[in-house]
Image (spheres, coloured by chain):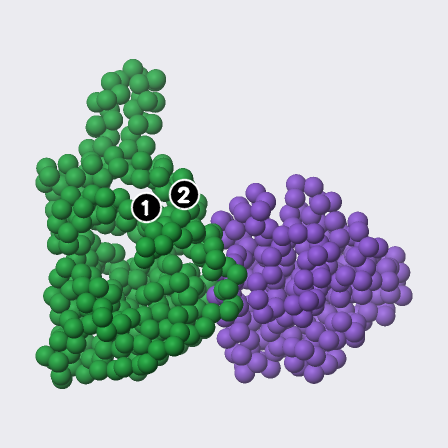
Amino acid sequence: MKPLKGCDEGLEENLKTFLNLDYPSYEILFSVASFEDPAYPVAKKLIENNPKLGARLIVDPVNLGPNPKVNNMVRAYELASNDLVLISDSNVRVKRDYLKRMARYMRNKKVGMVTAVISGAHEKGLGGKLEAIFLNTFYARWMKLLFFVGRPCVVGKSMLFRKTTAQRFGGINVLARYLAEDYMAGEAVRRLGLHVVLAEEPITQCIGRLGLKEFWQRHIRWGRIRKSQAYLAFLVEPILGSVFSSIVGAIFCYLLFRTNPLNLFFLQMVIWFLLETPNLIKSGSGVSVSVFGLWILRELLALPLWINIALGNTVQWRGKELQLEVGGLLANEKSKSENSSDGVSIPVFH
Amino acid sequence: MMLADFHVHSNFSDGKMTIPDVIDMYGKRGFGAIAITDHVGESRTVIGKAAGHLGLCLTQATFPLYLEILKSEAERAWDMYRMVVIPGVELSKNSISNHRSAHILALGINEFISADGDVADLARDIREAGCVSIAAHPVDSGKLEKQTYHLWNRREELAQAFDAWEVASGDRLFPEVLNSSLPKIASSDLHIARQMTSWKTVLECERHPEAVLDAIKKQEVGFRFYRDTHHDTSNSIINSDFRSLVELGHYRPASGDLGQSVAQ
């Protein structure tokens, strides 16, 4: 299932990677919220150019809650004819064996969901480069840590599950009330006693052009959603980050051994960077002086970013300022959580 | 006659088992009805907020998933075991003082009920939502855990506010409640599998949620101590009904030998 919104840089190329996957039998369901969406002609053209695929484009949004992505793909989900469903965002590119690798984990009946680490690529602009470094270091590190401690964090860029499993927690409809539907889907699967698996190989997110301001705002929003979902993990983020721990280490060593705190700070930062290199190499960023410089900049921005995130509970969402509550619910969503209703729309299938 | 347990926790709060595992455990032992009652903490207190962040209680965010899973698992429980599963919550008002702490069970819920406000208002809200309200472990539970005396301290004022008061919780019988004229119920307050050995309620009614809740309201209930032998359900039920307990009057059994003592 490919829920689409807007025409991201490289959208057509991204979608094309899903057309010829090495998998015995699968169907592709594109969904957009309106005919005016710039993604509509792109998906339509792909379907017309590849008639043998039997892919479909669904324009039939519903209004089940504040999450536009879920609203966009509910009808497509209902139409999906297979039990095994893969939801994948429009800005990811995959290799031919992607689906096969992901589906392999589902052979184990105790596995309820499979997700993947995202690696950032095709980045442009300073914000884009920082985003790629963020995904390929901090984000990858935390994803693996959370899985290691048994509190998996599923990402909607790539989530594979069974419809029959989702049915047990109310299907994807129930996820429309959350801004982070992917995280809550993983939570539901975990509470059912099923495993959430992190696929070994990362998939590529096509970042495109991003300015520094966009990077900052994007991470404020993402961080505040993260804070509302997993408050305790958010609290310890700086402690487990390079800058904070290096400052603390430098101060302690100065007090105990009178070592030069500045030298020790940089030494620790270099050690941190060396520890990040496996993730950087695996994601394709590689290791170079420029990558090191970007990494330092991203790490230095992390603490002020964290403070900014900590100081507020609002996010900018589709031009509106929304108040977040514990668990990723919107403040005004609490009162109507049991009273959601479908929007009126005319289904169009291609 | 059917065995029932109306106070059971899952991993949606501080229980260790998943809802499917809880249902299979009770279903395989031949129970006729259970209520899964995970904690709902207060949203405005430090303790309540901390419990929410630690995942030790339901929040408005996790509640919809909880209810959906309960609904689908209730269907499975009926198909597989002919067991009624009633969705519930335990409204948990926890304070540093045991005398200001109170836990209230709401059985038959369809929507989120907040634990904020005075206990009398909460009990009224529960009934207005068409649910059954139960005062949970209102006296010393005998366990190394937070005690909740607030409801018992106000028992005269709140006597009519609840459909039942727990006369036993886990393997502990509460003589104070037993000797009172308050409506009663017995349950396990199960958090882990080995707490299955505990007091249970017995009912004689149709296996239907409304009939079960009605039996509690009308007090058409009895109580038995259930000693879990894991697989052999027939040997695991050890005596006795409510009347014989009443006859024991001030009897205060030692933990662990309840079933045998009552039988004698």
Judge whether B93 appears above or below B67 on screen: above
Residue beneath label 1, please? A220
Of pointers 2 and 1, the one earlier in the residue sequence:
1
Q: Chain of mark 2?
A: A
Could you tell me if the residues under marks 2 and 1 are in contact, i.e. CB atoms within 8 Å? yes
Identify the mark at residue A312; answer none if there is no mark.
2
Q: Chain of mark 1?
A: A
Colour green maps to chain: A
Residue at point 52% right, 78% down?
Answer: B76
Colour purple maps to chain: B
* Residue B68 visible in the snapshot: yes
For badge 2, the amino acid type reads Gly
Q: Nearer the viewer, residue B186 or A153?
A: A153
Query: x and y percent of residue A214 in the render?
Result: 23, 47
Quarter of the image for residue B242 reads bottom right
**Few, some or many residues within 10 Å of mark 1 (<14, 14–19, 20+):** many
**B198 sits to left or right of A80:** right
Secondary structure at numbered mark 1: helix
For badge 1, the amino acid type reads Ile
Secondary structure at numbered mark 2: loop
Q: Nearer the viewer, residue A135 or A70?
A: A70
- Identify the image quadrant of the N terminus of chain A: bottom left
Identify the mark at residue A314; answer none if there is no mark.
none
